[in-house]
Image: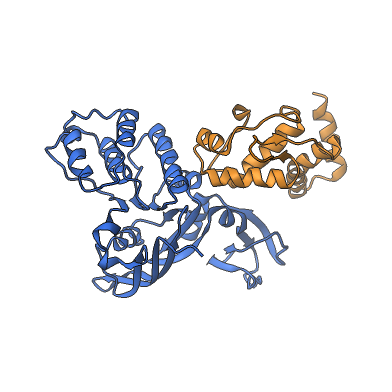
Chain colours: A blue, B orange
Amino acid sequence: MTQPLLSYTNVCKSYDQRQILNNINLDIKPGMVVGLLGKNGAGKTTLLRSALGLLTPEQGEIHVFGSLNTELDIKTKEQIGYVAQQTFGYEGFKIADALALHRSFYPSWDNELETKWLARFELNPNSAINNLSIGQRQTLALIMAMAYRPKLLILDEPVASLDPIARREFMGDLFDLALDSDSGILFSSHITSDIERVASHIALIKDGELLIMDELDLIRDTVRKVSFSDSGVDLSTYKVLNKQPNSAIIYGYTGQDIAGSVAINALSLEQLFVELHG
Amino acid sequence: MLEFINVNPNSGDPIYKQLHEQIVRLIVGGQLATGDELPSVRKIADHFAVNPMTVSRAIGQLVDQGWLERRRGQATRVAQQTTVQSDQQEALLFKAVDQLIQQAKQLDVPQKNLAELINKRWKQ
């Protein structure tokens, strides 16, 4: 077994008596691109920030490369990339100066990659950061988090402000990182079609609980919406993710007949997301 | 060949299945002939902006099922097909036919009428 790059064990966290994370168990291993899905306020950002030691869970433990998240040394931190939802800092800097400063913290910074990405995303090193659009700031933040090829990359809604072309380019870079450098990536996004394209795994959280975490293809292949008129239908052989009076979302379906069901339908990721919050 | 394939991340089918099904169609339909080379996994993944592992899964299944063949150090190629072509063609229509039959049943259209309907529309 490969050691996970990032590992949550029974993690709980609350603010003002409100439970934000409830007993989260999650491992990110090399090569994984994990899409984190959840409604606004479901606990995604708390989950991501706690990996960096920015938050301390009340219960449970988080390990990054085998060390506790609150005791990470500099060598370990140099291998983590993070892009927050709200960027940025470096106000009053030119792009080139901000990058020079940022680069100085990371010995393994790849100058060639930086130059390539600046050109590709049409960022002029002489532009002032104050004058950049939100999308351009986001792009720069991604370059700053990825140009040293981190072993663990944590992204909080990284592409929301990028145009479709830039999003595609950026996804290609993510794969290069995950597969060529054997890194692990955990990213949250509301754009389900992007997750569908990029993710190898899906982690879905609802009200602070991890509802599913598995390979995307496995989820897509075995999650079904079962409709029925009699709610006494026997679904005990499946994991029931959500149950309504006339339908249920089940996980682990492999083509059997379900007695009493009216219809059994596959769901796209977006449909699954909506159904689970019904 | 990539221009013949269309990936839709919002469809009910996972992306690896969409790739699998469409490549089978290209082979059965003759757009891809025995010995034709497929682009590399990375190239296909880049083209559709999808995870290379997804592409790899589709290609792997096609190899296992004998549609494609992979030799060490060489590009993946379309394999010599051993099953009868008409069987393959028909198999590809099962899903659409099943859906049609299901709809006919829901609308209470008898089998005989459905057959007549297909006949009539076919001639148009």
Quarter of the image holding residue B90? top right
Which percent across, then down, holds residue B10?
53, 43
Which percent across, then down, holds residue A176?
44, 42
Q: Is A207 situated left or right of A58 in this image?
A: right
- The reply to whether residue A256 is in sight is yes
Which percent across, then down, holds residue A265?
63, 54
Q: Please name the residue shown 40% across and 49% down the image.
A: A190
Compare residues A181 and B87 and report the one nearer the observer.
A181
Compare residues A14 and A178 and report the one nearer the observer.
A178
As drawn, the residue found furthest toward the bottom would be A59
Q: Please name the residue shown 16% across and 42% down the image.
A: A90
Q: Please name the residue shown 51% across and 44% down the image.
A: B51
Q: Is B14 situated left or right of A88 in this image?
A: right
Q: Is B46 situated left or right of A147 in this image?
A: right
Compare residues A181 and A217 and report the one nearer the observer.
A181
Task: Identify whether A258 is placed above or below A32.
Answer: below
Task: Identify whether A91 is placed above or below A34.
Answer: above
As drawn, the residue found furthest toward the left would be A92
Quarter of the image holding residue A221? bottom right
As drawn, the residue found furthest toward the top would be B124
Numbered-mark total: 0
Which percent across, then down, holds residue A122?
30, 28
Q: Please name the residue shown 16% across and 36% down the image.
A: A97
- The reply to whether residue A243 is in sight is no
Task: Identify whether A66 is placed above or below B52.
Answer: below
Quarter of the image holding residue B112? top right
